[in-house]
Image: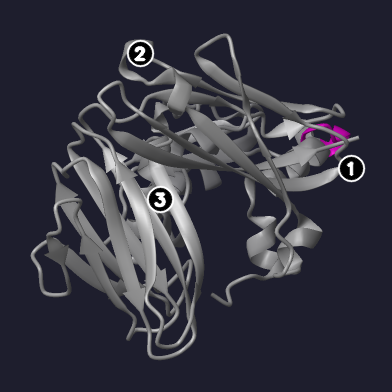
């Protein structure tokens, strides 16, 4: 979508882990005082922060751009967590009144705060409740993407980002019901931040029927799309993903562990992994390395990424399967990992 840049690349969590590894061990790190803050508001409806908050909510409370748990700095002092979005904290409208007393303190480095620190990262990978897919759109050709939805969900949100505003998007349920622009479940807007200028079209379906849903896209000119489907409530697929964000050994282990085994058709569970390096991401024609995780211990799919050189790697794990009742499901887990020496 034309948004790749060195700045965007540096914001990957793997790049941040690399930075933390370099900085946290620096002997000068204790010479300054560090103060942190966090928020849990997403800003105006349909704004960039609102869309960011919607996506990040699967990983816990957030301010539309950053999860609260990532504000924790072991050698810092947490000032506050408030009902504020990222921009209001960044610009000072929701934060300066709480920062000002610290700035006026002569010995700021000795200030003791009783503010509770944000909760640590929720490693319960049931938080991974999204399905992500994207690709090119060719002039005059209809692109159809199938999204499996399991039974018992409270809500499914199908969000499509495209570069152009005239891309026609429709949603078809397993029973054939068609949702289009103008339907009550449909909304749209223009992203002003993360993918500035991109058009966002969204279908928010309550209690979606189980089965294979179809997202249909057509454009009068060449374009690209990013489809993110977010599932919530009910009996959403529950599993954990073990994949460290920082690793220093040669073989990086990873596994997907399923909970509530009585719900799953264990023979149908599968996980496909795609790995991209920084060089791969710059070369649009490179498909990267792909491999499958293998069944282990009955309730897990496991494997390892071997022979990696130091650097930042992007891992996309697509998990698919069926419930005991034959209802299909699919989830996408995307992680950025720093592998050091």
C-alpha span from label 2 to label 3? 43 Å
**Is 32 on the left-hand or right-hand side of 127?**
right
Q: Nearer the viewer, mark 1 or mark 2?
A: 2
Quadrant of the drawing holding the C terminus: top right
**Residue 149 is at least partly visible in this image:** yes
Which percent across, then down, holds residue 306? 83, 33
Q: Nearer the viewer, mark 2 or mark 3?
A: 2
**Label 1 belongs to which residue?**
309
Main SS category, magenta section: helix
9 inside magenta stretch: no
Question: In the image, what residue occupies the spot 83% across and 46% down?
Answer: 311
**Residue 93 is at least partly visible in this image:** no
**Label 3 belongs to which residue?**
95
Q: Residue 260 carries which label?
A: 2
Q: In this view, does 261 lie above or below 115?
A: above
25 inside magenta stretch: yes
């Amino acid at each position: 979508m034309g948004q790749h840049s060195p700045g965007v690349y540096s914001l990957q969590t793997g790049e941040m882990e690399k930075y933390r590894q370099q900085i946290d061990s620096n002997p000068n790190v204790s010479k300054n005082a560090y103060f942190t803050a966090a928020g849990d508001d997403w800003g105006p409806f349909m704004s960039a922060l609102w869309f960011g908050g919607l996506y990040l909510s699967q990983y816990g409370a957030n301010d539309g751009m950053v999860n609260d748990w990532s504000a924790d700095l072991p050698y810092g002092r947490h000032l506050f967590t408030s009902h504020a979005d990222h921009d209001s904290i960044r610009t000072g409208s929701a934060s300066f009144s709480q920062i000002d007393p610290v700035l006026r303190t002569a010995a700021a480095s000795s200030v003791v705060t009783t503010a509770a620190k944000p909760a640590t990262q929720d490693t319960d990978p049931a938080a991974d409740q999204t399905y992500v897919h994207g690709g090119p759109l060719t002039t005059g050709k209809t692109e159809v993407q199938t999204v499996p939805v399991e039974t018992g969900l409270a809500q499914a949100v199908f969000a499509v980002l495209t570069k152009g505003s005239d891309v026609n998007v429709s949603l078809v349920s397993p029973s054939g019901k068609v949702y289009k622009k103008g339907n009550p479940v449909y909304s749209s807007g223009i992203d002003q931040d993360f993918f500035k200028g991109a058009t966002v079209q969204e279908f928010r379906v309550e209690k979606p029927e189980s089965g294979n849903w179809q997202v249909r896209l057509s454009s009068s000119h060449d374009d690209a799309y990013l489809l993110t489907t977010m599932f919530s409530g009910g009996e959403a697929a529950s599993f954990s993903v073990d994949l460290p964000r920082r690793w220093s050994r040669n073989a990086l282990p990873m596994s997907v562990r399923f909970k509530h085994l009585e719900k799953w058709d264990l023979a149908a569970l599968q996980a496909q992994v795609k790995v991209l390096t920084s060089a791969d991401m710059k070369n649009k024609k490179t498909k990267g390395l792909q491999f499958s995780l293998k069944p282990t211990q009955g309730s897990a799919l496991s494997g390892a990424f071997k022979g990696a050189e130091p650097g930042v790697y992007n891992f996309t794990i697509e998990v698919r399967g069926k419930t005991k009742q034959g209802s299909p499901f699919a989830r996408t887990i995307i992680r950025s990992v720093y592998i050091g020496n």
